[in-house]
């Protein structure tokens, strides 16, 4: 009896299994029929919309087939599976069918992208990882685009220094440009720091122009040390620091000032304020006929001028507000200058601005910090002793003189030998130095001053201390232009003001530097009133005549029988005769 019941029970169980299988097949077929109808209803309009894009049609058909194959995701038969499928911010559609738009271009124009932080991931993209219930996973929806993707088909602009500072970025850029393909790969994989299995998206065709901007030194380094640089970056654009100053460019500069005002929502400038800013720009360019193109300096000046105008409750920015901004900026950064001027005022730094002195002259130099440059006079002295005509540069002997300064001393020595040693050795040895100078000395802008000091020591003719001099010279005694002429003139003017003006004080500059004069208003006013003087010379003999009050007797004016050259030759001949007498 029990055996018979077991046999019947097995048959019933078998029948139930068949019915269950048949039911599941019918349910699946029904689900597929309904799913086909529902999905086709939504897919058909999309196919019609994108009928001219075969790639999208292929994708839609593949997605439709995959949806029919994985209807269980939508029916949520498995709670865990459904939760994992929807593990995203957008819960309207399972991750499997979401579209990860890497880049979207809304117009037909070529994109222009500026990358401020060119790290490897920011440039080439990366694949993120997500965590769900303690499990780390990734898929196509976690692929993130980089600047190369956003700029593809257009232009990508980057700072060369920032690119070179980031590890592995430069090699990645060269690899992408050479292959003309863009691959999204984890940096950890590139440097073999991780063996984690991740996605490996197919490379994307790359059609991109890269613009690197930086200083000339960086360009030279890349060109010298990277053989591929010139091949990959074939076009070089060398931008000017300034531009010609004409009526047209001044008008354009005023427009540029206006654009900064509008962008920063600043008060408008009066005509006098714009004129003052343009004058300041020419001062920055160190040329009356040029305008500086350093826009950041002008923008900062406008913002500070706007502040002072706002403090004064003015409706517009005037020239006085610009002057106030410039004065405030100088006050903030002039600590070193104030300290040195205090040393001059207290007598710690020895400078004479009146009277005359033998073998002593006031040269001019420029000192610079990161934000500020200013001029200051230096006492240059020369002494003579019996010798064979050599000029001993003390700065060079103690390794405080730079190469250019040493070259200047050699040039003036050559010219001195041309004047005084054509037929015989100069029987004097000259020692030349910058007094109270404890740092490095470089540049040749003191060579005319040094020549005059040496000539004074040789001829025993004193030089005026109320006139300072700057300028280099060549082997023919011609004055050559120098830099920082405005700061040098203003520095001596300020020292004269501290020590006591006498209305005879002034500065000698090369004639070629006249176009560079963009002096402070107080200096210009003193020159106009005849209280301060600026002398432009073309030859060192002119400077020597101004400083000594005697005719030089050489140079463009020709030989003079009673000039300094005659005095020098007579003294040297007497020295030779005295030496021969003592030797015999």
Image: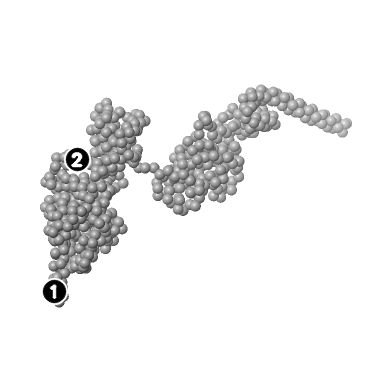
Residue 314 locus on image (x, y percent): 25, 27
Q: CA distance from mark 2 to mark 1?
A: 57 Å
Residue 359 seen: no
For residue 581, the mark is 1
Q: Which residue is mark 2?
A: 524
Q: Residue at x 55, y 35 (%)?
A: 102
Q: Residue at x 13, y 61 (%)?
A: 567
Q: Is residue 483 above or below residue 416?
A: above
Residue 130 locus on image (x, y percent): 56, 38
Residue 438 locus on image (x, y percent): 24, 57
For residue 67, the mark is none
Q: Is residue 507 above or below residue 248?
A: below
Residue 525 locus on image (x, y percent): 17, 39
Residue 436 figure quarter: bottom left
Secondary structure, mark 1, is: helix
Q: Nearer the viewer, residue 176 or 538?
A: 538
Q: Residue at x 72, y 24 (%)?
A: 33
Q: Residues within 10 Å of mark 1 (few under 14, many from 20)?
A: few
Secondary structure, mark 2, is: helix
Q: Earlier in the sequence, mark 2 or mark 1?
A: 2
């Amino acid at each position: 009896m029990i055996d018979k019941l077991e046999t019947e029970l097995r048959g019933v169980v078998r029948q139930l299994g068949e019915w269950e299988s048949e039911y599941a097949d019918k349910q699946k077929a029904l689900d597929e029929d309904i799913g086909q109808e529902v999905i086709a209803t939504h897919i058909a309009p999309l196919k019609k919309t994108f009928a001219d894009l075969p790639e999208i049609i292929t994708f839609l058909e593949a997605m439709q087939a995959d949806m029919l194959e994985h209807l269980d995701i939508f029916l949520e038969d498995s709670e865990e599976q459904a939760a994992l499928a929807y593990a995203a911010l957008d819960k309207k559609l399972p991750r499997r069918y979401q579209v990860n738009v890497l880049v979207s271009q809304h117009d037909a124009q070529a994109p222009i992208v500026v990358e401020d932080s060119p790290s490897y991931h920011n440039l080439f993209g990366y694949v993120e990882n997500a965590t769900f219930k303690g499990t780390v996973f990734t898929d196509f929806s976690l692929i993130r685009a980089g600047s190369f993707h956003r700029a593809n088909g257009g232009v990508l602009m980057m700072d060369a220094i920032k690119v070179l500072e980031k590890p592995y970025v430069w090699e990645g850029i060269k690899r992408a440009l050479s292959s003309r393909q863009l691959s999204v790969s984890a940096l950890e994989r590139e440097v073999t720091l991780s063996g984690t299995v991740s996605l490996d998206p197919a490379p994307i065709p790359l059609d991109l122009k890269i613009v690197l901007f930086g200083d000339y030194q960086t360009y030279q380094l890349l060109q010298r040390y990277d053989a591929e640089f010139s091949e990959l970056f074939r076009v070089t654009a060398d931008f000017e620091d300034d531009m010609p100053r004409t009526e047209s460019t001044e008008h354009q500069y005023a427009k540029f000032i206006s654009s900064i005002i509008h962008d920063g929502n600043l008060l408008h400038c009066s005509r006098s304020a714009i004129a003052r800013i343009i004058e300041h720009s020419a001062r920055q360019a160190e040329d009356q006929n040029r305008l500086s193109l350093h826009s950041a300096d002008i923008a900062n000046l406008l913002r500070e001028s706007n502040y002072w105008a706002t403090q004064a409750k003015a409706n517009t920015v005037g020239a006085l507000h610009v002057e106030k901004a410039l004065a405030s900026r100088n006050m903030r950064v002039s600590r070193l200058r104030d300290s040195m001027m205090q040393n001059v005022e207290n007598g710690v730094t020895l400078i004479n601005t009146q009277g005359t002195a033998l073998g002593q002259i006031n040269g001019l130099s420029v000192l610079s910090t990161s934000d500020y440059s200013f001029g200051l006079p230096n006492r240059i002295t020369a002494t003579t002793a019996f010798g064979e005509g050599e000029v001993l540069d003390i700065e060079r002997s103690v390794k405080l003189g730079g190469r250019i300064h040493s070259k200047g001393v050699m040039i003036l020595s050559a010219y001195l030998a041309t004047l005084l040693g054509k037929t015989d050795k100069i029987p004097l040895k000259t020692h030349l130095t910058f007094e109270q100078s404890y740092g490095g000395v470089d540049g040749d802008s003191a060579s005319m001053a040094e020549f005059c000091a040496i000539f004074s020591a040789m001829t025993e003719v004193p030089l005026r201390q109320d006139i300072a001099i700057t300028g280099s010279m060549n082997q023919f005694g011609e004055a050559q232009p120098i830099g920082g002429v405005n700061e040098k003139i203003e520095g001596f003017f300020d020292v004269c003001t501290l020590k006591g003006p006498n209305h005879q004080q002034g500065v000698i500059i090369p004639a070629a530097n006249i176009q560079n004069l963009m002096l402070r208003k107080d200096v210009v006013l003193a020159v106009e009133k005849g209280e301060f003087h600026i002398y432009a010379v073309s030859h060192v003999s002119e400077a020597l005549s101004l400083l000594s009050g005697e005719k030089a007797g050489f140079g463009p004016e020709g030989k003079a029988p009673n000039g300094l050259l005659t005095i020098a030759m007579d003294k040297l001949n007497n020295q030779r005769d005295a030496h021969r007498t003592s030797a015999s």
